Image (cartoon, rainbow, N blue to C red):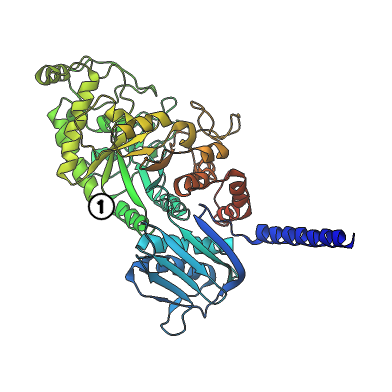
């Protein structure tokens, strides 16, 4: 009897202790997003103060250090200094331990912090995780904090997918340089590494091309008394009685590229062709349109005559100059050429296209598109670039390089099909990753309604195929009338995107808790107008 009572008391004590430890863990376990591959919480805290010193054995950590120093300077008004004798923050280059690119280990004890990596990106992501372990005020700017308590822990981490992207459309609604930089920095805070910059479309040409100044003089301005119509449903929302204008100079673009590079983000510029080109053909109709073409057509967005003619040699001279200037501005592998939604009826009555079809034995419109993209692939190769495009560019087996990157947007199945055909493929299905769609179907919700709603939970539920190159969400801007709406549609959905793209193991209930506990306070500290 006494033995039984003793067993019950021991069991009760064990249950009480377990409950206490569970509560302690729930209250102190850091809410890191995206979820690390391995995380172990230890006892105690490291306290970072003005007296804290760092030591590094590798220049690969320099960029990560600068990022950490900038946040401490902004928030606490002191600089993290170096020391070889009494340092307590260490950056160690150990490729024999860290096997995967972009991976890192983070070890925090009450006495020290050690970030171990094999490349500069790994060191940067180690710092990003370190900042997430700190009070959300570290992201606010100037605060009253002069010391930062960081929980002791051990983290081993590396990304699931190489390509973790976000697209921002600045053509339909223009966003100034300061917002683009904020957009990029917030991506970096959650280990996203590809910024797809949709720079041209029917509604505006937003990149300076010095060889063709009318692209921005005419193509970047729309509204009353301009050559570019202001609004055609549903391509542009908002007031129609004002002039809207804006573009990025090449000097501004170079600064944005450098800003992104410091955050380990590559920028993929998109020049949308041959459809979605109303701004370009309005600026240079003599170069891009067949003067004898009597075709009448409208795009799916109801925009008339918005398509570059692929049978004009002046088209390729024009695009050669454009690609040359774009390739010099963006020092990365890919330039995105769009390729989606060429309107039915385009070129149907173009004598130049009919001659081209006879000369090259082309039998239908899709074969004309194939000819166009084969020519464009040669131009890209000439400048050391590869083609990226929407899934339509390979629908009819064009003669383009197999290194061409396909973005599958119509469905997950479309992405799987492109992968099976041997193309590197980024998954961006509208059903899960189009952030221009409403969160839920409701009148007061901003966003589009032409596809299904995309809730936070639905984003998180997306399971990309293992053989995909990566994952990307798209923020089209037809309804983004201001920065607040852009923030609202992007956040907190971008948090779910980050975890889908990075983490091998995911749990919705745990993710939801981490979002509420620290991710939303981090967004609030940065004055991001997120959806609550």
Q: Residue at x 44, y 26 (%)?
A: 234
Say if residue 135 shows up in the picture: yes
Closest to the observer: 440 or 31? 31
| 21 sits to left or right of 494 | right
Q: In what quadrant of the picture does the N terminus appear?
A: bottom right
Seen as rendered, the residue at the extreme bottom is: 85
Residue 242, percent from left and from top: 43, 35
Say if residue 238 shows up in the picture: no
Q: Residues within 10 Å of mark 1 (few under 14, many from 20)?
A: some
- Pointer 1: what residue? 331
Using the image, determine if residue 298 lies above or below residue 210: above
Q: Residue at x 51, y 73 (%)?
A: 77
Closest to the observer: 434 or 26? 26
Q: In what quadrant of the picture does the C terminus appear?
A: top right
Residue 35, percent from left and from top: 52, 52
Using the image, determine if residue 28 lies above or below residue 109: above
Using the image, determine if residue 335 lies above or below residue 228: below
Q: Residue at x 45, y 32 (%)?
A: 430
Residue 296, percent from left and from top: 28, 15
């Amino acid at each position: 009897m006494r033995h039984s009572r003793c067993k019950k008391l021991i069991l009760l004590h064990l249950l009480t202790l377990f409950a206490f430890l569970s509560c302690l863990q729930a209250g102190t376990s850091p809410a890191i997003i995206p979820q690390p591959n391995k995380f172990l919480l230890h006892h105690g805290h490291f306290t970072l103060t003005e007296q804290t010193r760092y030591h590094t054995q590798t220049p690969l950590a320099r960029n990560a250090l600068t990022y950490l120093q900038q946040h401490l300077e902004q928030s606490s008004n002191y600089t993290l200094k170096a020391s070889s004798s009494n340092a307590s923050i260490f950056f160690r280059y150990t490729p024999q331990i860290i096997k995967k690119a972009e991976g890192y280990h983070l070890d925090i004890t009450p006495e020290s912090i050690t970030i171990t990596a094999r490349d500069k990106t790994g060191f940067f992501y180690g710092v990003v995780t370190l900042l997430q372990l700190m009070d959300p005020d570290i992201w606010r700017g100037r605060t009253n904090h002069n010391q930062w308590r960081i929980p002791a822990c051990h983290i081993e981490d590396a990304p699931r997918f190489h390509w973790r992207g976000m697209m921002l459309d600045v053509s339909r609604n223009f966003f100034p340089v300061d917002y683009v930089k904020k957009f990029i920095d917030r991506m970096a805070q959650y280990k996203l590494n590809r910024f797809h910059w949709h720079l041209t479309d029917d509604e505006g040409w937003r990149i300076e091309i010095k060889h063709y100044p009318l692209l921005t003089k005419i193509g970047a301005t729309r509204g009353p008394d301009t050559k570019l119509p202001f609004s055609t449903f549903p391509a542009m929302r908002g007031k129609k009685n004002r002039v809207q204008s804006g573009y990025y100079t090449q000097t501004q673009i170079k600064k944005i590229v450098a800003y992104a590079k410091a955050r380990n983000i590559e920028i993929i510029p998109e020049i949308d062709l041959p459809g979605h080109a109303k701004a370009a053909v309005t600026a240079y109709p003599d170069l891009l349109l067949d003067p004898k073409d009597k075709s009448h057509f409208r795009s799916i967005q109801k925009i008339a005559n918005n398509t570059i003619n692929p049978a004009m040699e002046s088209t390729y001279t024009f695009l050669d100059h454009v690609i040359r200037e774009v390739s010099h501005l963006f020092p990365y592998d890919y330039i995105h050429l769009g390729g989606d939604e060429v309107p039915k009826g385009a070129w149907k009555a173009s004598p130049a296209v009919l001659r081209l079809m006879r000369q090259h034995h082309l039998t239908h419109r899709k074969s004309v598109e194939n000819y166009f993209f084969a020519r464009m692939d040669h131009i890209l190769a000439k400048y050391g670039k590869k083609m990226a495009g929407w899934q339509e560019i390979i629908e009819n087996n064009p003669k383009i390089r197999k290194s061409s990157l396909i973005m599958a947007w119509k469905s997950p199945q479309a992405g799987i099909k492109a992968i099976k055909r041997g193309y590197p493929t980024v998954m961006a299905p509208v059903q899960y990753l189009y952030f221009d769609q409403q969160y839920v179907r409701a009148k007061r919700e901003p966003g589009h309604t032409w596809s299904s709603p995309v809730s936070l939970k639905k984003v998180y539920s997306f399971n990309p195929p293992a053989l995909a190159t990566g994952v990307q969400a798209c923020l089209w801007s037809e309804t983004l009338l201001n920065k607040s709406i852009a923030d609202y549609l992007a956040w907190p959905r971008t948090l779910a995107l980050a975890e889908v793209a990075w983490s091998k193991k995911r749990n919705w209930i745990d993710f939801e808790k981490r979002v509420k506990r620290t991710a939303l306070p981090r967004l609030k500290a940065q004055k991001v107008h997120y959806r609550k």
